[in-house]
Amino acid sequence: MISNKTYLKLLFSIFIIIGISVMSYSVNFAKNYPLPIIDHISFDAKMKFIRDHIDINEIDTIVVGSSLALNNVNGVILEENSKTCKHVLNISVWSISALQVEKILELTTIFPNLERIIYSGQFTSFNFANVFKKFDTDFLKKYMQNKLSPLEYAAFIANACKDLSFCKKREEEWKKEYMDNTKFSYLDFDHTGSAPLHIYGKDIIKSRWNRGDGPVQNPNALKALARIADNTQKRDIRFYFIQQPYRQAMIDKSPNIQKIMKSFPIDIAKIIGKYNGTFFNLHEKLHLDDTHFADRSHLNDKGSSIGSQEIAKFIDAKEAK
Amino acid sequence: MLFNYTMGRELVHHSTKKRNYSPKKLLAFGVIANLALLGYFKYADFFIMNVNRTAGTDIPLLELALPLAISFYTFQQIAYLVDSYRKETQEYDFLNYAVFVTFFPQLIAGPIVHHKEMMPQFAKLKNKVMHYHNIALGLFIFSIGLFKKVVIADSFAVWATQGFDIEKNLNMIEAWFTSLSYTFQLYFDFSGYTDMAIGIALLFNIKLPINFNSPYKATSIQDFWRRWHITLSRFLKDYIYIPLGGNRKGEIHTYTNLFATFILGGIWHGAGWTFVLWGALHGLALVIHRAWQKLGLRMPTLLAWFITFNFINIAWVFFRATSFESAMKVLKGMFQGDLILPNLNLFSDLGITLGKWSRVYYDSYIGLWLLGGLLVVLVLPNSMRWKEKFKTNYFYLLFTVLGFLAIFMLHRKSEFIYFNF
């Protein structure tokens, strides 16, 4: 038995020690790993990347979309081959819909010298209309610019690290899953935020390679695209939509895919054309063979490099006029 | 609050003043006013939906936000009015009355407290000074509740939600996992909340009544209701069952009163037919139990426990399901679902495929968790026993610290189930 007063003194001392240990772990975690912001590690990682590595005054070109932009557009190659796209930021996040792209583009008002937005996708990008469950634009803008007050940042870290087991799990997964460019989960961005995949031979996943996609387009996703083009025009920024390559073998064996590959370019060009947006059919331009693909729609680094050179040429030509 | 306080005072002083209305009418007015408010916020849409369904009308729903804890403080204030009518209340000041109704630790999900046990505590001067033992004990009980909620209940919640809300079909084992997960989730969630409420109240030297006493150890349905949400059972008995006549008017009336009390108890929990059915099932079980006792029949304790536990588990399906379809899906799985064993790696390596389970069940240690949950509720002392044993020594110090570590698992947040009621 110890006295009540001593018991409480000991208890609160232990609480303080635990509190300090947890705080130092959390600060260290926040420094080295993406903090959970919206329970989407690809998004969380991109926010941290921008915060840590991007000079917002430099960026003139933003590449946006799902993995079809993150992996398929190589920002470094684009910068090297273009006279107009001098400072590229690939702000893309895995598996996001056009509605989510629209939300992400709300964040781009922090880039004062932004001249163009390149939305990279395929007909599959408009099959769904997912939304972010929570998306605090003002907070994210402040976070990306490193403008959170110490108190706000501390609250953010404390909130993000409430579940230490989650942080520990993310720490382990980060090394195992996200640093390996032979996996689709690759998130070790180059200096532009792109993540080109080095997936060849045995690393190719058969089910991803051969599985066909549904052709049905979600009207809400297409409406979001129209709004994106409209808002971009209003901000006096050039808007490009790049239709990414798709494995020809998949098109050949599916009448539905053949049909959508014909109608999709027409529909998209029409939607964005209303707002002076420019459509570029990279699939049609390159007709890449299977050696350039990591699966049916994702390019490997060889494919993304060729594709990005072509995008650079196209944009330079377009803007030279 | 002001309305009920004034009504209560008026009821107490009624005989000493000349009034042209009877105290009974005044009480009826007070009770109806409280129930009307509860009915408007909680049951209006349920009523409109049923009118629309039966009369084929298209009356728009009100979609009102339910004021937090309305079911709890309505009950507490009705009890206050009834006791004032019975002249069983004392002269309380408004401040203490307001603290009684809004005392934050138990405001949202109980225990449902009685003015007789709370108001004297608020008035007691001794309770207004810091009491180190109560703080230590309060933190200990709070830590048990926190652990129950964050670590145990929220783990079971994942599997319960998967089965009830996500899976379209369940095989037999998945369905039993689902229902048992909810059975444990509800207990650890609700009793965890109660422990936290009791713990916080102790920091202010206030002792809240016991609300759970190892309910899943019950060997009859009557025993269960003496152990589960004890303060609700007390309210239902004192303010519904006994005023209806209790067991004073013969057997048939007793059965009817029991049944009616539990139908009302079901409706109190939520505006939906699944809650009515849940209440009816419990009412019916109590009637059968009473008849069984009257006949002087006996049953081995283990069998009695087994039947009681399974009945409670099955009845919870209606309590949890958001619709009859969802309830039937789980029940159909439990009793008519395919018996599919998991496709363990051991067997698939040998080329034997046993079947496919939903990944949420397959990838988890749900079987071990359920077994652990059962052991905890059947073998370990409950938090009230721990409270009695508590001493300021190193064992309890470590116990408290470990319980508080659950705070670092808050990412898997899910609100307390009883917040909805």
Image (tube, coloured by chain):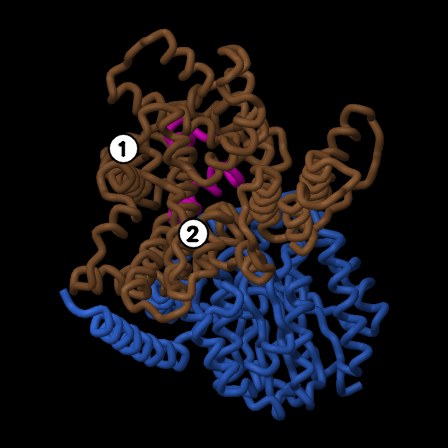
Chain colours: A blue, B brown
Position of A129 relative to B274 (above/below): below
Q: Residue at x 62, y 45 (%)?
A: B12
Find the magenta span and give its range: B153-176
Label 2: few (<14), some (14–19) or many (≥20) C-alpha neighbours in 10 Å: many
Please name whichever residue, B138 or A21, is drawn nearer the observer in this view of the structure: B138
**How far apart are the two marked residues, 1 and 2, measured between alpha carbons?**
48 Å
Instruction: Give coordinates of residue B226: x percent, y percent.
Output: 38, 32
Q: Residue at x 71, y 38 (%)?
A: B32
Q: Which mark is residue B351?
A: 1
Q: Residue at x 66, y 86 (%)?
A: A111
Q: Would you name the residue on which mark 2 appears?
A: B193
Instruction: Give coordinates of residue B324: x percent, y percent.
Output: 59, 28
How many numbered marks have been drawn onto this rendered protein structure? 2
**Quarter of the rendering occupied by the N terminus of chain B:** bottom right
State which mark lies toward you, 1 or 2.
Answer: 2
Q: Residue at x 59, y 54 (%)?
A: A248
